[in-house]
Image (cartoon, helix red, strand yellow):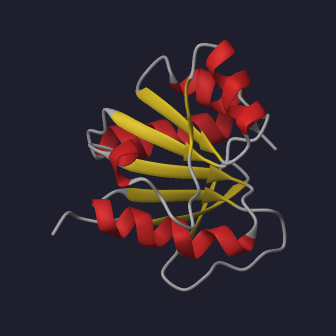
Amino acid sequence: MDIDAIVEFIKINAEKKECRRIVEVGIGFSFEIAKRLMRYFNVTVVDVNDNAVDKARSLGLDGRKDDIFNPNIEIYKNVGLIYAIRPPRDLQHPILNLAEKIGADVIIRPLLNESPVDGLQLKNYKGEVFYIKSNEKI
């Protein structure tokens, strides 16, 4: 996994949409991408695991506990882009649903050899595979 290419792809797409706030869903304990993106955006990281959220906060990230299957919409106010790095396939639909609800774009860096759920478009960037969707607020 090329972290530089992933950060660059997210940054380019967020800047294209003039996003100020972005959210990483399912941060787990992989903080490098969010930390790098903090240089450019107001980044919130979300996970259901209290320990992951606490660790994110200790690293200076805006960590929030949330369940993507029943999201707290307040966390996602004014978010222009939601991204996820290698989320389980069963999280892709809830991510898309949330993004549609708030009018945010989606970038998913999938696990390898995984086909996208309906509604996502495949993009390749510097050898990295992404699934994306652009949403407009209604």
Q: Residue at x 64, y 41 (%)?
A: 6
Q: Nearer the viewer, residue 48 or 111?
A: 48
Locate the C terminus and report the quarter of the image it occupies: bottom left
Above or below, 72 relative to 11: below
Name the spot of residue 52 as percent of width and height, x first.
Answer: 74, 34
- The reply, left or right, for residue 19 in relation to residue 26 is left
Where residue 131 appears, as percent x and y from the top left, is 58, 66
Which quadrant, please, contains the N terminus?
top right
Q: Nearer the viewer, residue 43 or 134?
A: 43
Q: How many marks are shown on the rendered structure?
A: 0
- Residue 70's place in the image compared with 23, above or below, is below
x 26%, y 43%: residue: 78
In the rendered view, tell whether residue 56 sits above or below residue 70.
Answer: above
Instruction: Look at 31% across and 32% down and name the residue there.
Output: 20
Q: Residue furthest left?
A: 138
- Image check: 79 left or right of 3? left
- Where residue 76 appears, as percent x and y from the top left, is 37, 47
In the depicted structure, whether residue 92 falls above or below residue 33:
below
Q: Position of residue 130 (x, y in %)?
A: 62, 60
Residue 98 figure quarter: bottom left
